[in-house]
Amino acid sequence: MQNRRRFIRNSLLTVAGAGLSAGISRTLQNLPETGGRSIIRTMGKTNISLPVVSMGTSSTSNPALIKAALDNGIKLFATAAAYQEGNNEKMLGEVFKDIPRDSFLVLTNSFDIQWIDTPTGILKPGFRQDELLKRARSSLKRLGVEYLDFFTQPFAARRESVIHDQALRAMETLKHEGITRFTGIATHRHEPEAIRAAADSGVHDFIMTSYNFMKENREELGEAIQYAADAGLGIIAMKTMAGAYFDKERTRPVNTRAALKWVIQNNNIHTTVPDCTSFDQLSQNIGTMAEPGLTDGEWEDLYPSSGQHYSEIFCQQCGICLQDCPYNVDIPTLMRSYMYAYGYHNMTLAKTTLTAAGLAGNPCSGCTACLANCRMGNDIRKKIYDVTGIPEISEGDTKDGNYLSYNNSPDK
Ligand code: SF4
Ligand code: SF4
């Protein structure tokens, strides 16, 4: 457990005056909670200064939300070619086309997940650099920009997935061709190892890592983040809300305001990319910069004195269960999809992740009894049944929430 006193001592936050994009005139919403104050940090040697709260866009298709974010000081938008099959990039492009290029920053990745062994992050032999360049140029087109600011290699995990000749050459070429200004990795698994490798690579400029109050390896992760920050890399935190709920039925919500505050108290985190689907969420996220300190009540919400939260939504992505599965089913990716579906209610992202990873349908059909154990106490087989049928659910059902009772079990 993190030592609270030390945590607070390390939390000398830089609160700057209003860093808002007052010059951009397309306000659609007033966001009442924002407080007009921004915490600005500089992303290492990239020299880019930006608010510590940015925005992930995978959960929204609403351009008005993006415009409101811009109007309230958000600079960086994190997307991916896979989100909504390219339509998320197109939606951002519609917003970006009317505003000066230096008024926003954009991060994406255009990798085909089929190229990646997701448990290790290592590129498979089918990876082709020319195809990556083609796909990255398609992202530029959809976003309507001449260059990207940040481009990530996704699913980085083991050191060899980052210090990998082909991967590094591809990232250097993207910069050399002017497709992106900066490259980095995105990591959900074995994050400390991947982060240190990126810092040692001599190629990457930033890392984007899963980081939140529920991470069991948060101390080790914090040290790796420190290592990368000391090496001059920019640090972006994702998965900051730890699934948003602790249970599938959504009876136990995470205090998401406190969760975001917890992340930004680490001064090495230069920015965060929480997804949001509503103006209220956006307002709350931006508002954390006005009052960034954790109150005693908020601390209690994150770390109850009665004992640690049990989450059936947030998977640590530790991969320990993999050693028990005789069929090499990618359980952590299934569990991450479960979080997208039942925590964030981002059915499209759950579908995309499952389908791209070849996990749609029932990857456990040949198995009569689950041998895989989750060290966090989760019922792996039940969760797999709950999530693997999602790609077959119609858009209508996903919107209505009917999928909440969906179960792919052969015994249902
Ligand atoms: S049921 Fe469990 S052990 Fe069997 S294939 Fe699925 S994850 Fe593996
Ligand atoms: S299901 Fe459990 S054991 Fe497997 S990766 Fe997630 S937290 Fe780790």
Image (cartoon, rainbow, N blue to C red):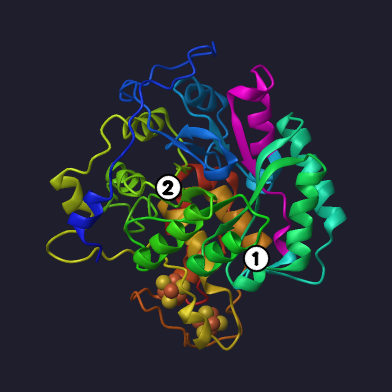
User: Which residue occupies 47% across, 85% down?
Assistant: 370
Compared with residue 163, is residue 205 higher up or lower down, i.e. above or below?
above
Residue 179: % across, % down: 77, 40
Using the image, tell me which numbered label, if any, was put on residue 332.
none
Residue 153 is left or right of residue 207, and the answer is right
Question: Which one is in front, 297 or 166?
Answer: 166
Residue 185 is left or right of residue 246, and the answer is right
Residue 338: % across, % down: 47, 61
Compared with residue 348, is residue 105 higher up or lower down, i.e. above or below?
above
Label 2: which secondary element = loop
Label 1: which secondary element = helix
- Name the amino acid, label 2: Ile
Question: Which one is in front, 32 or 100?
Answer: 100
User: Which residue occupies 52% across, 76% down?
Assistant: 410
Residue 82: % across, % down: 67, 49
Compared with residue 98, is residue 394 higher up or lower down, i.e. above or below?
below
Using the image, tell me which numbered label, if any, was put on residue 269.
2
Does residue 92 show up magenta in the picture? yes
Q: In 3D space, how far apart are the residues under numbered discs 2 and 1 (Cα atoms)?
A: 21 Å
Q: How many labels does the image show?
A: 2
Nearer-N-terminus badge (2/1): 1
Mark 1, residue position: 162
Quick check: marks 2 and 1 in contact, CB under 8 Å?
no
- Name the amino acid, label 1: Val
The residue stretch that appears in magenta:
87-114
User: Which residue occupies 52% across, 69% down?
Assistant: 193
The answer to whether any part of residue 281 appears in the image is yes
Does residue 269 show up magenta in the picture? no
Question: Which one is in front, 15 or 399?
Answer: 15
